[in-house]
């Protein structure tokens, strides 16, 4: 490969980031703007200062999703922060939810004979469409095996609403809980000038 081609060929990491930005999102638009801005900073070569993010959030970043918590036979599964198929920087920053891990936990709760019902504890602006359809389908197809409830506490929007609405019943904690924001948004990144 010539030197000229090496200089203009985008890195695999850059292509992955652009792919994420160009993919469809089911998320509150303001949150997508935040996500895009962080990606753009990274694409411009800026370092992401995780300690500054921790200081701004007032908590340590944790790349571990809260898993199953069983109380009196009820499996409580958290759907919180940005929803994404896999754990990544944004799920780490937002305390987000991996649909892959959520699906594993949901299936484990279904198969656990000591669990008599499942509660999805939802506080999420939504997230990436990838993985959301499969998660909602898993929940919908499990109806009738055990009662499945969704609790919107704070925000249950877009991808999170899609997941929660697959439950047998949906409850919200109060009049100020944001529920809905149904729609899919996508962005397009033109990298032709970067060459």
Image (tube, rainbow, N blue to C red):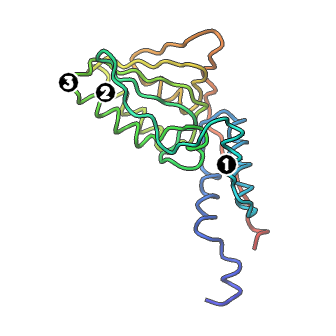
Is 156 drawn above or below residue 193 in the view shown?
above
Asked whether 53 or 157 is in front, the reply is 53
> Is residue 31 shown to the viewer in this render?
yes
Give the image location of residue 105, x and y in percent.
Answer: 35, 35
- The Cα atoms of the two marked residues, 3 and 2, are separated by 15 Å
Q: Are marks 3 and 1 in contact (CB under 8 Å)?
A: no
- Residue 117 lies in quadrant: top left
Residue marked by disc 1: 51
Residue 142 marker: 2
In contact (CB < 8 Å): disc 2 and disc 1: no
Q: Earlier in the sequence, mark 3 or mark 2?
A: 3
Q: Position of residue 52 (x, y in %)?
A: 71, 47
> In the rendered structure, which disc, 3 or 1, sits on the residue that comes first in sequence?
1
Q: Please tell me whether residue 119 is drawn above or below residue 135 in the rendered image.
A: above
Instruction: Give the CA distance from mark 2 to mark 1.
Output: 41 Å
135 or 40, nearer to the observer: 40
User: Image check: 168 left or right of 183?
Assistant: left
Number of residues whose C-alpha sits closer than 10 Å to that of mark 1, classed few (under 14), some (14–19) or many (20 or more)? few
Is disc 3 surrounded by few (<14), some (14 to 19) or many (20+) residues within 10 Å? few
Looking at the rendered structure, the secondary structure element under dot 1 is helix
């Amino acid at each position: 490969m010539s030197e000229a081609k090496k200089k203009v060929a985008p890195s695999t990491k850059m292509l992955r980031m652009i792919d994420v930005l160009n993919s469809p999102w089911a998320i509150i638009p303001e949150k997508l703007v935040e996500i895009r801005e962080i990606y753009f900073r990274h694409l411009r070569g800026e370092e992401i200062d995780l300690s500054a993010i921790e200081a701004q959030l007032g908590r340590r970043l944790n790349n571990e999703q809260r898993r199953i918590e069983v109380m009196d036979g009820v499996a409580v599964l958290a759907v919180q922060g940005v929803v994404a198929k896999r754990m990544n920087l944004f799920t780490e920053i937002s305390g987000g939810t991996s649909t892959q891990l959520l699906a594993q936990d949901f299936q484990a709760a279904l198969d656990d004979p000591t669990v008599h019902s499942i509660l999805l504890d939802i506080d999420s602006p939504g997230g990436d469409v990838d993985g959301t359809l499969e998660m909602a389908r898993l929940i919908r197809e499990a109806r009738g095996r055990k009662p499945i409830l969704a609790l919107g506490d704070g925000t249950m929007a877009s991808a999170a609403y899609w997941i929660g609405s697959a439950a047998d019943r949906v409850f919200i904690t109060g009049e100020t809980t944001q529920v809905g924001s149904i729609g899919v948004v996508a962005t397009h990144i033109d990298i032709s000038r970067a060459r």
